[in-house]
Amino acid sequence: MREILQTVLSMYRDYNGTGMQMGLFFACLAYLAIQKKEKEKNLLFLGYTLLFFIICFCPVTAKIIMEVCIGEEVYWRMFWLLPSVIVTAYTAAHILMRMEGKGKRHVFLFAMLLVIVLTGTNVYNGTVFDRAQNAYKLPQEVVDICDMIEQDAKANHISHKKLITKNELLSSIRQYDAGILMPYGYDAIKKNQAGTTNAYQIYQIMSSEKKNWASLSWYAAMEDCNYLAYPAEEGIAETLSAFGYDVVGTNESWHVFRRDFKASDYEGEWLITQHGAAQGSQLMFYTLQDKDGRLIVVDGGWTTDADYVRQIIKGLGNHVDAWLITHPHRDHAGAFTEIYKKPGKMKIDRVYAVDMASPEACLKKAPWDETEVYEEWRKLDIAQLTYVHAGDAFEVGSLKFQIFNAYDDYVDEQSKDLLNDGSMMFKVTAKNESMLFCADVGKRMTSYLMEAYGEELKADYIQMGHHGNGGLKPEFYRFIGAKAAFFDAPDWLLNDTSGRYQAIKNVLLMREIGAEVYSYATTPNQIILQ
């Protein structure tokens, strides 16, 4: 209740401003209170104002109004119910009527107006109101964008017009042209959510400072959004043309683009997202989605990342078709271990993991290792669990999985670092492209894997072994020949030049090969696996 009262007081202080207007209002109430004539009218004003303050500032009634009626965000509008303008005008008229002589009346009227002007704020101060730019009293950019869309649609006989644009224009576009659809409305901004999974992702992209155009094009196709309006920044037309957008209208400030791709154009393709770490540590967390709403999750990160992982999965529909746990280290399996204890409304169809050596066996070979999360993992009764082994293959939707590495006797022979070198290395293949996930497999396994699988290992994209810090040998990465490399690591690890970490060497190696480098500096990083 104390917090509610503090909230109301804060809103009142903001409404009060300099205090001069409210001071004038209270002065008028005081004047009416001492008047003997027309007591009924005066008591009405006084009684109403007193009742308002009791209801407005009482924590109980304030809580009811916030939660049931108008919401906390707009509770400040309650102060619009104060009869400040009516009382001030009525009091001024009352005093004027009692004054004798035109001169006195004119002086008093001028004084009242001067007080109001000097203590008030110009409505065109730029914070609330703007001067009308056209007869529609809407931003001119909205009129221009809608007119460009309408002109293109008419010229090309297009009846379906669904637009993605900057969030602050949503309500104005709806007012000007209700025939232009949008994936979400103004409610998405107020509630930080949108109606569908794809619409929510569009909202997130358009809310971010740096736009991921590849993923926007994906979600736009899923939502059948054929128009995009964006400020006419330098190079934006060339950037968007790479994703199938054509400029169909332009002025000095805005470009309007159109693309006619449908969700069916992404048949058999998958959107792969690398998620980063809020706390600046290394971890591994990927999601893979197809046009039919299938969702695959790889690892997830630390136990402290569980809420973040829940939020991401909820935003993608809260249904996981397959969850792969590459190995039970805390920066890989921690979040899943926490989530599986209390999944809530999340649905998980299948869990794939490695049948790892016991914690005791792992620590016997590598006493420096840690097994706390692994021990928690072993306590879980996972009904959906399937253990995978090297050489296994399976499919999720149209995506093919090949398992190249998992814990087995050969790992014991090659390495003492069982948890890392026994982790799941797998390749996912879509229609024409593939991505190799190396998990935390290290240098000791390099020769064995290259000899065992050869050309099968090659992929278009690669998730770097052991977060890119050490991991597999340079000849392995050269052999794969990927055009993009994902480092599951923060900047401090990738840029360390002390010699303690090896990540910077692998970054330079991949750039030398010609691969684009992705890391936590730019997450979420997304590619479309074609």
Image (spheres, grey):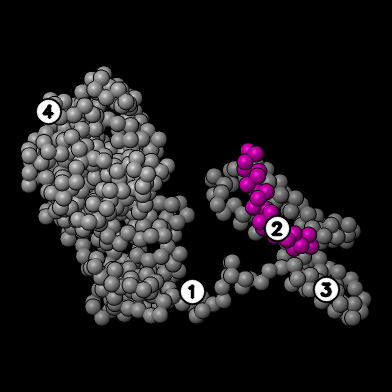
Residues under numbered marks 2 and 4 in contact, where contact means CB atoms less than 8 Å apart: no
Secondary structure that dominates the magenta span: helix
**Image disc number at residue 16:** 2
369 displayed left or right of 453: right
- Give SS at disc 3: helix
Real-space CA distance between mark 3 and mark 2, rounded to the nearest whole angstrom: 21 Å
In the image, the segment drawn in magenta is 1-24
Residues under numbered marks 3 and 2 in contact, where contact means CB atoms less than 8 Å apart: no
Amino acid on which the number 4 mark rests in the picture: Tyr
- Give SS at disc 1: loop
**Image disc number at residue 138:** 1
Real-space CA distance between mark 2 and mark 4, rounded to the nearest whole angstrom: 75 Å
Identified at 25% across, 70% down, the residue is 241
Q: In the displayed structure, would residue 457 be above or below residue 342? A: below
Amino acid on which the number 1 mark rests in the picture: Leu
Identified at 19% across, 51% down, the residue is 461
Quarter that holds the N terminus: top right
What residue did someone put label 3 on?
111
- Give SS at disc 4: helix
Number of numbered discs overlaid on the protein picture: 4
| Residue 311 lies in the magenta-colored region | no
Comes first in the chain, label 3 or label 2: 2
**Image disc number at residue 410:** 4
Image-quadrant location for residue 393: top left
Q: Position of residue 225 (x, y in %)?
A: 29, 64
